[in-house]
């Protein structure tokens, strides 16, 4: 998988590079020179970030900083799609190339088009929530890039229970805690946008 995400984490925490890379077999210089790393190395780095960076929203902040432009050909294909719905379909179909430990599906619902994230493909344990947060922020960035300044009411579906200090919303979007799936809901009216 691309090494970009790990490099960006290290850029945000340069003093903690040794801790973030512990057990991966990589040094900061090696990571900087590589185009790809294994999924296991990526997850190890994310696991260390979960312990080191801390804060309930670090993964949300990190995902928001990644944006859609951080995803190479997949991001370019999605942003170049004829419609928002087709772009979300591309993210669902090819997302496992960028995150092979996740499954994705685009599920039409009565009033929404839902990008569903399946964390059951790989034993993520405590990494499931931050990985989902990163992915959903990237999907939100895609929707924002396509819709521009048009106000869009998104819904974040989070399968985990609501933490005690959790916000009720995220950047104007609605949060549904304890949902039967993890995903991002986009108004169905925007499918052909």
Image: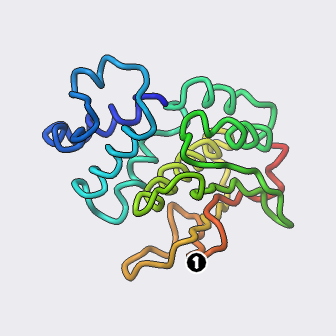
Residue 44: name its quadrant. top left
Residue occupying image coordinates x 58% and y 70%: 159
Residue 129 in the image: x percent, y percent?
A: 46, 62
Mark 1 nearby-residue class (10 Å; few <14, some 14–19, many ≥20): few
Of residues 91 and 87, the one drawn nearer to the viewer in this rendering: 91
In the image: residue 27, left or right of residue 136: left
Q: In this view, does 55 lie above or below 67?
A: below
Residue 92: name its quadrant. top right
Check disc 1 and report its element: helix, strand or loop: loop
Residue 120 in the image: x percent, y percent?
A: 59, 58
Q: Quadrant of the C terminus?
A: top right
Q: In this view, does 91 lie above or below 124?
A: above
Of residues 55 and 50, the one drawn nearer to the viewer in this rendering: 50
Residue 133 in the image: x percent, y percent?
A: 48, 56
Please, which colouring scheme is shown?
rainbow
- The residue where tag 1 is placed is 178
In the image: residue 174, left or right of residue 186: left
Residue 61 in the image: x percent, y percent?
A: 39, 52
Residue occupying image coordinates x 23% and y 43%: 20
**Residue sitting at the far bottom:** 164
Q: Is residue 163 above or below residue 144?
A: below
Q: Is residue 58 above or below residue 73?
A: below
Residue occupying image coordinates x 63% and y 56%: 118
In the image: residue 8, left or right of residue 100: left
């Amino acid at each position: 998988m691309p090494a970009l995400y790990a490099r960006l984490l290290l850029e945000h925490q340069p003093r903690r590079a040794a801790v973030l890379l512990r057990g991966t077999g990589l040094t900061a210089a090696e990571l900087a020179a590589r185009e790809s790393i294994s999924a296991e190395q990526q997850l190890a780095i994310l696991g260390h970030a979960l312990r080191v960076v801390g804060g309930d929203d670090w993964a949300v902040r990190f995902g928001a900083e990644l944006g859609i432009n951080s995803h190479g050909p997949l991001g370019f294909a999605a942003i170049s799609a004829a419609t928002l719905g087709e772009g979300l379909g591309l993210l669902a179909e090819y997302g496992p190339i960028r995150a092979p430990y996740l499954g994705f599906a685009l599920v039409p619902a009565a009033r929404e088009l839902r990008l569903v994230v399946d964390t059951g493909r790989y034993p993520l344990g405590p990494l499931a929530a931050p990985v989902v947060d990163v992915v959903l922020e990237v999907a939100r960035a895609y929707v924002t890039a396509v819709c521009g300044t048009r106000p869009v009411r998104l819904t974040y579906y989070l399968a985990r229970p609501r933490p005690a200090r959790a916000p009720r919303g995220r950047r104007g979007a609605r949060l549904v805690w304890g949902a039967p799936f993890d995903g991002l809901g986009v108004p169905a009216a925007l499918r052909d946008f």
